[in-house]
Amino acid sequence: MGGGNLLNTIGPLILMFVLFYFLLIRPQQKRQKAVQNMQSELKKGDRVVTIGGLHGFVDSLDENKVVIRCGDGSRLTYDRAAIRDVVASETSNA
């Protein structure tokens, strides 16, 4: 008889954990993985930033655009989900 009572007590906690996982943890992991892929696959002079903060470099690519440059050798274009970070490269051998 006490078994049903235990399920009634622990059940909501388990349900809350499952909801927490699917609503918060899992989507965050997916976002992180997507950002990591984006950062590891951009190239040609990199640097970048944007999603409203612009900055510059890359200067072409495709598979859904990019281009950029700036530092007032302006070029722009973007997309590739408007980037948002990377900040490094121009063939990192300073």
Image (cartoon, helix red, strand yellow):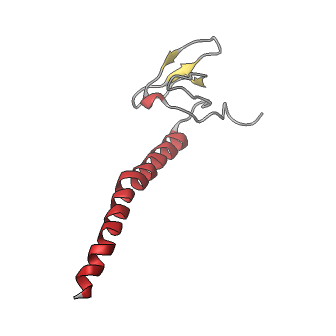
- Relative depth, front residue between 54 and 61: 54
Which percent across, then down, holds residue 43?
56, 35
Q: Residue at x 31, y 64 (%)?
A: 15
Q: Residue at x 78, y 33 (%)?
A: 94
- Relative depth, front residue between 19 and 62: 19
Q: Residue at x 33, y 74 (%)?
A: 10
Which percent across, then down, holds residue 90?
66, 30
- Relative depth, front residue between 85 and 21: 21
Picture quarter with the N terminus:
bottom left
Task: Count the marks.
Answer: 0
Which percent across, then down, holds residue 60?
51, 24
In the rendered image, the vertical position of residue 62 relative to residue 18, given as above or below: above
Residue 62: name its quadrant: top left
Residue 21: name its quadrant: bottom left
Which percent across, then down, holds residue 78?
47, 23
Residue that protrudes farthest toward the bottom in the picture: 1
> Is residue 56 toward the left or the right of residue 77 in the image?
right
> Is residue 10 toward the left or the right of residue 87 in the image?
left
